[in-house]
Image: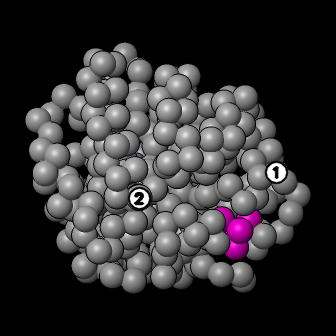
């Protein structure tokens, strides 16, 4: 086995993991997944994320930000900033745009996104991006920060053409359980085409199903299934995908 895998986006801060976390972490370790980037998404999850990173200082790497679904909440940027300035913070996120019908109004989302992008640039933190049905708008906004911000398109759901554009802006492309599904042709094509030095692996647990497991039962250990599928799609050894993606994560997030 190559070096341990890193789940670059999992919500171990989700209340769903409250009582199972020690077992989830242990099962991940046994499967060879030993690092977890855990993004906050709203006001309440900020503290929970910080607490988890103190409980598992060498495994849980915290990120802080406000997700577009919570764009309508009363956001206190001073509090967010105090978390972002903590010494072990590895990224700003989860932030982004979600133009699906039930999400908050687009202008509100764009306003909180751009405020957080400015913070990321100021603090020199990489960003974790959520993007649904909004790839062109997000691309246009990020273009304005070209060279000034690094980050990840998390569980990337866009077209091959958009993937290329985000790569050209310097972003990493992260694959989740979506790519493991047999019929997910767009994801398969993207996983075959992404340069190995821009590839990341994640589960987004507990939100995205894999071919083998329903969403609510997905844990960081399922990173192995994601890496295996990508290796199969590319016709290369599993270790090359796992090791390559882990090295990318270490580089991007400055992990120990
Ligand atoms: Zn997420």
- Rendered location of residue 75, percent (x, y): 15, 40
Query: Residue 121, relative to residue 8: is it above or below?
Result: above
The residue sitting at 41% across, 20% down in the picture is 100
The residue sitting at 40% across, 36% down in the picture is 96
Which quarter of the image is occupied by the N terminus?
bottom right
Q: Are marks 1 and 2 in contact (CB under 8 Å)?
A: no
Is residue 169 at all visible to an observer of this figure? yes
Q: Is mark 1 within 8 Å of ligand 1?
A: no
Task: Give the magenta range.
Answer: 241-245
Front-most of residues 40 and 219: 40
Is residue 254 found inside the magenta-colored segment of the image? no
- Rendered location of residue 29, percent (x, y): 50, 80
- Rendered location of residue 181, percent (x, y): 66, 42
Question: Is 32 situated left or right of 180 in this image?
Answer: left
Q: Which residue is mark 1?
A: 233
Q: Which mark is residue 124?
A: 2
The residue sitting at 77% across, 52% down in the picture is 195
Query: Which quarter of the picture shows residue 196?
Result: bottom right
Question: Is 49 situated left or right of 201 in this image?
Answer: left
Query: Residue 253, relative to residue 73: is it above or below?
Result: below
- Rendered location of residue 42, percent (x, y): 22, 46
- Look at the numbered disc 1 and give the secondary structure of its residue: helix
């Amino acid at each position: 086995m190559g070096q341990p895998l890193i789940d670059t986006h999992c919500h171990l801060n989700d209340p769903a993991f409250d009582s199972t976390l020690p077992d989830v972490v242990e099962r991940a370790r046994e499967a060879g997944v030993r690092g977890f980037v855990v993004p906050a998404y709203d006001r309440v999850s900020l503290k929970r994320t910080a607490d988890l990173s103190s409980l598992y200082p060498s495994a849980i790497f915290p990120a802080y930000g406000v997700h577009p679904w919570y764009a309508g909440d009363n956001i206190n940027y001073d509090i967010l900033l105090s978390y972002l300035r903590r010494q072990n913070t590895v990224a700003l996120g989860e932030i982004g745009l979600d133009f699906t019908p039930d999400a908050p109004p687009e202008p509100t989302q764009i306003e909180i996104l751009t405020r957080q992008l400015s913070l990321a640039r100021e603090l020199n933190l990489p960003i974790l991006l959520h993007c649904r049905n909004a790839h062109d708008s997000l691309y246009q906004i990020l273009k304005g920060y070209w060279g000034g911000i690094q980050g990840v398109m998390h569980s990337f759901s866009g077209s091959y053409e958009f993937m290329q554009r985000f790569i050209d802006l310097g972003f990493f492309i992260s694959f989740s359980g979506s790519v493991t599904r047999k019929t997910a042709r767009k994801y398969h094509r993207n996983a075959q085409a992404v340069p190995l030095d821009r590839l990341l692996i994640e589960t987004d647990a507990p939100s995205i199903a894999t071919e083998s497991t329903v969403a609510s039962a997905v844990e960081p250990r399922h990173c192995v299934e994601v890496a295996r599928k990508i290796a199969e799609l590319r016709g290369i050894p599993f270790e090359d995908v796992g090791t390559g993606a882990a090295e990318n994560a270490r580089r991007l997030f400055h992990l120990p």
